[in-house]
Image (cartoon, coloured by chain):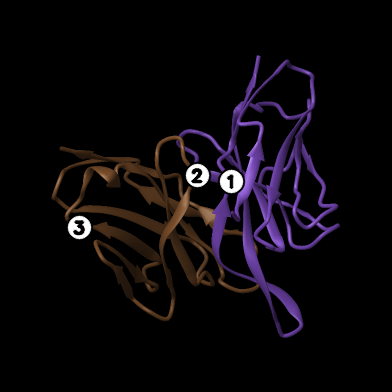
Chain colours: A brown, B purple
Amino acid sequence: GENVEQHPSTLSVQEGDSAVIKCTYSDSASNYFPWYKQELGKRPQLIIDIRSNVGEKKDQRIAVTLNKTAKHFSLHITETQPEDSAVYFCAASMSFGNEKLTFGTGTRLTIIP
Amino acid sequence: DGGITQSPKYLFRKEGQNVTLSCEQNLNHDAMYWYRQDPGQGLRLIYYSQIVNDFQKGDIAEGYSVSREKKESFPLTVTSAQKNPTAFYLCASRVSGTSGGATRFTGELFFGEGSRLTVL
């Protein structure tokens, strides 16, 4: 089955700086890669996702890049703000036909004011 | 107001007791899931259900049981056979569609607010 590794487990950055979280996956058949954000005491929520037919996707200060050859994908947050402090999870699955979404172990991001 | 409701939010149980966590959704989603969240281990899939009266084991099903008698409801029972039940449990649902005559699943998982179970 799919195995997703996520690094780092914790990350602290100064407000205004950029943050990068990296994930690798094992199943070359995976083609759907979402990122979820979980604020303290709240439910995880989807913040961005990418499918394997594109190499990069942006949404305001958030971007995700995908390298299918190397089987890794990354989350980039620019101009970080205090409200970006949360735990971020990457995940991988086949977008269709596979009901299982395999999650990484999470990255706790702390923005230092 | 559409969404997923989990109850109770906090639950304490003595060793040897079964406990049932409730999950109800009014999003008209066909697929529902139970995940367990432990520090440093991400979200691990316990059980999932694609349609009413059908469910499958996830990666860590041992010691758990589920039922799916209604589309809106997917309760999880943590049995006394679960060796380390203290955890945060998340229920989720997802849109499904039909492709080539088979059910497929797309996109976003919508999560409930979770239930924290502590075994005393």
Residue A33: where, in percent of width, then height? Answer: 45, 65
The residue type indicated by label 3 comes to Thr
In the figure, residue A12 lies in which quadrant?
top left
- Badge 1 local density, few (<14 within 10 Å), some, or many (20+)? many
Q: Residue at label 1?
A: B112
Tell me the number on the disc at residue A37. none
Q: Secondary structure at mark 2?
A: loop
The residue type indicated by label 1 comes to Gly
- Badge 2 local density, few (<14 within 10 Å), some, or many (20+)? some
Q: Earlier in the sequence, mark 3 or mark 2?
A: 2
In the figure, residue A47 lies in which quadrant?
bottom left
Q: Mark 1 and mark 2 in contact (Cβ < 8 Å)?
A: yes
Discs 3 and 2 carry the same chain letter: yes
Can residue A98 be seen by looking at this rendering? no
- Give the chain of mark 1: B
Above or below for A33 versus B38: below
The residue type indicated by label 2 comes to Arg
How many marks the image carries: the answer is 3
Residue B84: where, in percent of width, then height? Answer: 65, 26
Q: Residue at label 3?
A: A78
Q: Residue at x 35, y 71 (%)?
A: A67
The C terminus of chain B lies in which quarter of the figure? top right
Q: Secondary structure at mark 1?
A: loop
Question: For the residues marked 2 and 1, what is the alpha-carbon distance in whole angstroms?
Answer: 6 Å
